[in-house]
Image (cartoon, grey):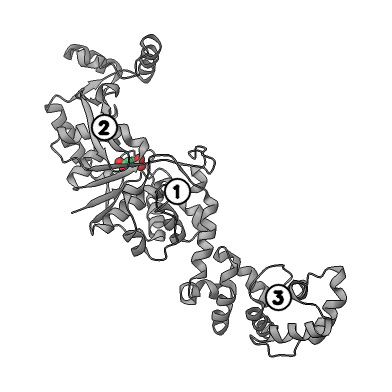
Amino acid sequence: MTTTRFAPSPTGYIHIGNLRTALMNYLIARKAGGTFILRIDDTDPERSKEEYVDAIKRDLEWLGLHWDRVERQSQRLDRYAEAADRLREMGRFYEAFETPTELDLKRKKKQLNMGKPPVYDRAALALSEAEKDALRAERGQGVWRFKLDHERIEWPDGILGDISIDAASVSDPVLIKADGQVLYTLASVVDDTEMGVTNVVRGSDHVTNTATQIQIIRALGGTVPQFAHHSLLTGPQGEALSKRLGVLALRDLRERGVQPMALLSLMARLGSSDPVELRTEMSELIDGFDITRFGSAPTKFDVEDLFPLTAHYLQGLPLSAVRDHVAALGVPDDLAEPFWLMARDNITTLADLRGWWELCRDGADPLIADEDRAFIAEAMGLLPDGPFDVDTWSTWTAAVKDATGRKGKGLFMPLRKAVTGRERGPEMAALMPLLQVVRARA
Ligand code: GLU
């Protein structure tokens, strides 16, 4: 049974980079008819906030990435303590007492003097019980490190291909902090094993974690899941996104009017060899998803790409999908359909509807070039009395054409500008009846 998880730390709002991870794990589970777990990685009581847990759920719900169950690491601390005891019994766990400053000095010395990777030197392994007692008395509890086996750690990565990492080039990871807090590296392994997680997709910043976690999983007798590490996102010019991710929070994109299916369609394909295509149903995204199509190169992301996709998505929607939104503008029920059909091709996000509704309701200041004044005056004299219907525009412009000899753009554009106050907009044939009906009721 395929089981995946999305495991955010509730220390902030989730952003476009997190979405990529969530979506890939979701699509893998759904495609296989498996289980998708939302796992809240909240072992850090200082930084984890309930407010962020709620916000993460809201964002995923907005996108339609429904989870089968929620797990919280803060409720599983006894499981981690038990795993830690087992590692201790096996002799794979040792207490170390270096201060951060000492560790930093050691790192620098190593790099400068020997040109070696700044790996922890395992000095704590040589401490006698008496020395540990003395250090504990002086500095309090130590941290607990996992003793890596110095071998090559290898796995077939679902995106990166065959990976081989020399364990000797990696520091023994700290799994428990001096204050007793269990760190993610251990908690995640225990969860993945006990929850039967079969596939883990996450960012390539986790590759070294994966190497150490594979050894921990083996030590604890678990089954190593299939790992895949997706590339990290960059800005459109290849610049690092890390600083800008704060403004690429999903809630901000929602507020800017991005439509979920536009966002999901882009993120399910960006960085893969398949083209980005707008999908309107989640089932199409699920069927069309193939993780092996993704490459390891950094993936360029341009937030602006979301807007044409959003516009495209909206153009295909029937009124029923946006009825509440249209009603909230104050559009009467009987005009909702003609209004939506008139406006939907001329909006980027739903927020743009307001402008078209205001045009219908309040009219617009005419936009008339000096050289067109006489022409517009003459044309207005030819405007049919009404009631306007879908033929009014063609009847009127035909009459104006006959009277003035103008045609093409020189005929239509000044009339559009005079009526709507804008150079671009909806089909005039669809707009004219609305303008009249709405204003007659006002
Ligand atoms: N909480 C971790 C993170 O947000 C989860 C990483 C993982 O998927 O294992 O980076």
Q: Give the alpha-carbon distance from disc 1 to disc 2, as whole Å.
A: 26 Å
Mark 2 CB within 8 Å of ligand 1: no
What amino acid does circle 2 point to?
A: Ala
Q: Give the alpha-carbon distance from disc 2 to disc 3, as whole Å.
A: 65 Å
Secondary structure under badge 3?
A: helix
Crowdedness near tag 3: few (<14), some (14–19) or many (≥20) residues, C-alpha within 10 Å: few
* Earlier-in-chain disc, 3 versus 1: 1
Could you say which quadrant of the image residue 94 lies in? top left
- The residue carrying mark 1 is 16
Q: Give the alpha-carbon distance from disc 3 to disc 1, as whole Å.
A: 39 Å
- Residue 243 pos. (x, y %): 51, 38
Between residues 143 and 374, which one lies in front from this camera angle?
374
- Give the quadrant of the C terminus: bottom right
Tell whether 194 sits left or right of 21: left
- The residue carrying mark 2 is 211
What residue do we see at 26% from left, 21% from top? 168
Contact, CB < 8 Å: mark 2 with mark 3?
no
Q: Is residue 116 above or below residue 55?
A: above
Secondary structure under badge 1?
A: helix
